[in-house]
Amino acid sequence: MIEINGITKAYDGIRAVDDVSLTVESGEIVTVVGTSGSGKTTLLRMINRLVEPTAGAILIDGRDNRDLPGHELRRAIGYAIQGYGLFPHRTVAENIATVPKLLGWDRRRIDTRVDELLSLFRLEPAQFRARMPHELSGGQQQRIGVARALAAEPAVLLMDEPFGALDPIIRGKAQDDLIEIQRQFSTTIVLVTHGMEEAIRLGDRIAVMDKGRLLQFTTPAEIIAHPASDFVADLVGSADRAFRLLSLSPVDDLAEPGDAQGEPIDASASLKDALSEALWSGRAALPVARHGAIVGRVTRESLIAKAGRPQ
Amino acid sequence: MSPGALFRLVFVVVLVAFLAVPQAFAPVFAPFASNGAPAIYTQSGLLTLTLSHLAMVAVATMAATVVSVGLAILVTRPAGREFLPLSRSIANIGQTFPPVAVLALAVPIFGFGPIPTLIALFLYGLLPIFENTLTGLTTIPPSVQEAARGVGMTALQRLIGVELPLALPLILAGIRLTAVISLGTATIGSTVAARTLGEVIIAGLISNNTAFVLQGGLIVAALAFFIHEGFATLETALARRTRGALLI
């Protein structure tokens, strides 16, 4: 759990972060979204003390983050950044092993952990261990960057626009990977992004920042349905908010008993995909399948009703 | 074997052979010696002079490396940043001060011998290494520096583990420049009794014997070529290993 209490950072009297308080629960993904200059990165960097706050305090699992020297604190917190910052003179394995080595793990434990992480990110260890970063594609570099951040099994992972440089398809896969890994290890993640789309897709809760202030901190559904201000509403965008809302829930939520014709849709697919399929194929209802077996149907009526502004 | 490698091999063999048995090359230089003067310099052994010349360059270059790299590290730390302009001035003065003037000033203090030459070479060698190290240390990609801090490296761990290795190709380029410049400059040391290949050239100039001037000059040029090649190969190998450094 990360408790941010009244944190302020001023540079020459100008407040980059202005009295922000929020609590990130253990095992939760919180996305911090805002335009450039909103203070979101500064807020993130104060959690691992790459930036020291002017006022306020940050508690990680109840301990003030100033209890430890900065470098020791940072070894216990994963950190993945835009541009990845892989060490260009070190192999992939050496990059991933950075923090375990700083912590003095023994050789065998480090090697095991490196191979484990490479496999986790679908990179064949024997093939990738000895490669240099410049021999990797952007997507592979990004995965090594996250693998390095996770190497010492941190309870908290901070990410600063980690997918910013990836093309849309690779980014989508990287985001899915992150969600999967987070579920597997229940890592607490704070992720900074400038894209509301990404914030909605990844965040259990979203913190919207502007000019150093926290404007709203709540669930994606709540942000879409009830933006706290015009600025937040602009960030969410009004054009496709109905679809964004639908994209947050699985078909399972609206499945009902009954029959329907044609190709079934998977219960874990999003409502948005279901509506899109219903409209495209001109069907009033789609069969819903779970693990290959038909368990009911979802109707176009109910999908459309669900897309309306929540009351 | 590539033509380049073959050329180098032949070059080395010729140089070594010449230093080992200079008299065998007398017919080559004879046309340049006038009035029946000897074609090959024999007052001192050419090999001895070459080794002494190289030793002097090596000592001066190493001293300049230690001081320049040390200074560059110092002025790129947060605590030393205010000394950056001062240290730049010192290195620049070393470069603008003519080595001959250094000799003239140093001889009254240290007397004749190798010391004044070493001082001149040292001062003259500071700037290239200092500037290159400074460039290397200040052009580390920001994302790499951010990551190095973010994973919890201390300032010393960042310097030794990340900054210096990434700056190494540039530092080597600086040392190469200094070594090659010193190799040529060291010849003037013979005017104040330092034992360098300058002795052969000066003897040739005094006795109007072009053969001496040529053999002294050619040995220095060959040495400069090999030192340049050696460093350049090392730099390329290092740079290839970290080719993506500026892209990542």
Image (cartoon, coloured by chain):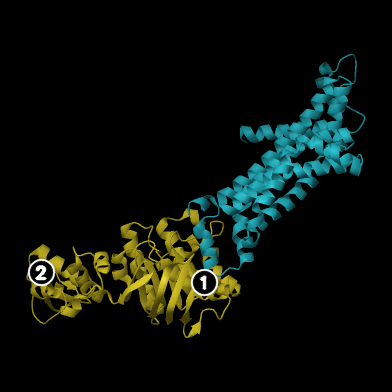
Chain colours: A yellow, B cyan
**In the rendered view, would you say B188 is above or below A184?**
above
Q: CA distance from mark 1 to mark 2?
A: 59 Å
Q: Residue furthest top?
A: B35
Return the chain for callout 2.
A
Nearer to me, A214 or B134: A214
Q: Indicate the secondary structure of the residue bearing disc 1.
A: loop
Nearer to me, A94 or B244: B244
The image quadrant where one finds the C terminus of chain A is: bottom left
Is residue A168 visible to the viewer in this orientation of the structure? Answer: yes
Q: Residue furthest bottom?
A: A62
First in sequence: mark 1 or mark 2? 1
The residue lying at 57 percent from left, 79 percent from top is A68
Label of residue A52 in the image = 1
Q: Residue A46 at x, y = what percent?
A: 47, 72
Give amino acid for label 1: Glu
Q: Indicate the secondary structure of the residue bearing disc 2.
A: loop
Nearer to me, B172 or B114: B114
Tell which tag, 1 or 2, sits nearer the viewer. Answer: 1
Q: Residue B145 at x, y = what percent?
A: 54, 60
Instruction: Name the image quarter holding residue A264.
Output: bottom left
Residue topped by disc 2:
A262
Task: Decide if residue A280 is on the left or right side of residue B161.
Answer: left
Label of residue A35 in the image = none
Task: Decide if residue A273 is on the left or right side of residue A160.
Answer: left
Return the chain for callout 1.
A
Q: Residue A111 at x, y = what percent?
A: 55, 70
Give amino acid for label 2: Gly
How many marks on residues? 2
The image quadrant where one finds the N terminus of chain A is: bottom left
Q: Residues within 10 Å of mark 2 (few under 14, many from 20)?
A: few
Is residue A118 visible to the viewer in this orientation of the structure? Answer: no
